[in-house]
Amino acid sequence: MTKVSFDELLDAGVHFGHLRRKWNPNMAPYIFMERNGIHIIDLYKTQAKLEEAQKAIKQIAKSGRRILFVATKKQAKSLVADLVKKVNMPYVTERWPGGMLTNFATIRKAVRKMANIDKMSTTSSWQNLSKRERLQITRERAKLEKNLGSIADMSRLPAALFVIDINKEKIAVAEARKLNIPIFAMVDTNTDPNLIDFAIPANDDASKSIFLIVNAAVQAIAEGLSERKMAKEKEEVAEETTNIEDVDIKSKSEAIVNAEEAADKSAEKGEDKAVEGKPKRKRKPVSKK
């Protein structure tokens, strides 16, 4: 698994926290020092927590489950979307739709509505609509695509959430906690890490810091998916080998049975010929004295 070095964390500015007056006391174990009124995050603890999170994320991806990335901050939107698309995971980079997890059935209805609009646009009934009706439906489709397009293929609740700023995404965090969904998150010095299952102390405002942490998570997912693919291929090869062996054994057993039947038939024919070709024994005449 790819590990992020201390120097990489330092260069990305992961260690910069918020002003002292904005700090959350629960972040005290992860704060190294204060400089010019700004808290500095302990990067050694960041490194350890990131490795722990990577291992857990890799196992989730290896099991075939999905992780939902949540990043609606302006500086994180495009970064997260571009990185997460590589591993085909769902993400939310626009407004978090309230009840997305706790009322997932309703969200799925909206996604199905988007699919129905796409289907309708290819039929003749689309041409029978007026220009105004088509425009309204198109606008509604664009709105759904903007808010829910990235989760269109998410047919069930995610196995975990990866959140960039838990203060901004407090609704998503609250819903995940209510449903006991594990949460991975970047926690800055103004957040409460006790709300998170896998807290990664890091600067959640700088784009370089966000890119480094999210990229590490995406690489862990990619490794988990590749291991899952390799395991499947091995299983398929093992199944094919087993099937071939079964066929060979079956053909051999059938050949043995056929050979035994042929031998029995030939033996029976040989006995019949021997019986037919045997000369009859002449009886000696009985002499009367």
Image (tube, rainbow, N blue to C red):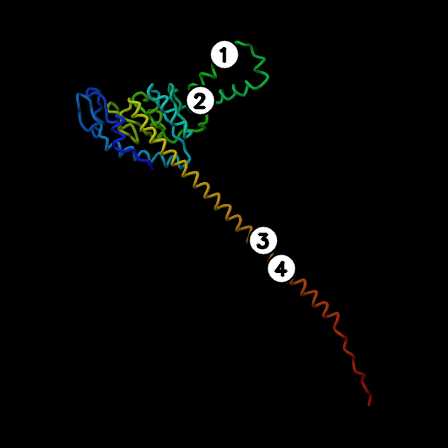
Q: Nearer the viewer, residue 106 or 232?
A: 232
Left or right placement of residue 116 versus residue 175 in this view: right
Query: Hey, what amino acid is under mark 3?
Result: Ser
Could you classify mark 1 by the number of other residues whose Cα lies within 10 Å: few (under 14), some (14-19), or many (20 or more)?
few
Find disc 1 in the rendering and name its residue: 136
Q: CA distance from mark 4 to mark 2?
A: 66 Å
Q: Quadrant of the C terminus?
A: bottom right
Image point (53%, 12%), residue name: 134
Residue behind mark 2 = 149
Q: Indicate the secondary structure of the residue bearing disc 2.
A: helix
Quadrant of the image occupied by residue 282: bottom right
CA separation in Å, label 3 and label 1: 67 Å
Q: Earlier in the sequence, mark 4 or mark 2?
A: 2
Q: CA distance from mark 1 to mark 4?
A: 78 Å
Q: Earlier in the sequence, mark 3 or mark 1?
A: 1
Look at 56% across and 10% down and name the residue there. 130
Locate residue 132, reporting x and y percent: 52, 9
Tell me the crowding category of disc 2: few under 14, some 14 to 19, or many 20 or more residues within 10 angstroms, Cα based. some
**Residue placed under numbered mark 3 in the picture:** 251
Q: Is residue 241 above or below residue 255?
A: above
Q: Are marks 1 and 4 in contact (CB under 8 Å)?
A: no
Quickly name the residue at label 4: 259
Q: Earlier in the sequence, mark 4 or mark 3?
A: 3
Residue 269, how many percent across, how many down? 70, 65
Task: Identify the mark nearer the N-term, 2 or 1.
Answer: 1
In the rendered image, residue 143, in percent from the top left (x then y), is placed at 44, 16
Rounded to the nearest angstrom, the CA distance separating label 3 from label 2 is: 54 Å
Mark 1 / mark 4, whichever is N-terminal: 1
Q: Indicate the amino acid at tag 4.
A: Ala
- Few, some or many residues within 10 Å of mark 3 (<14, 14–19, 20+): few
The secondary structure type at the circle numbered 1 is: helix
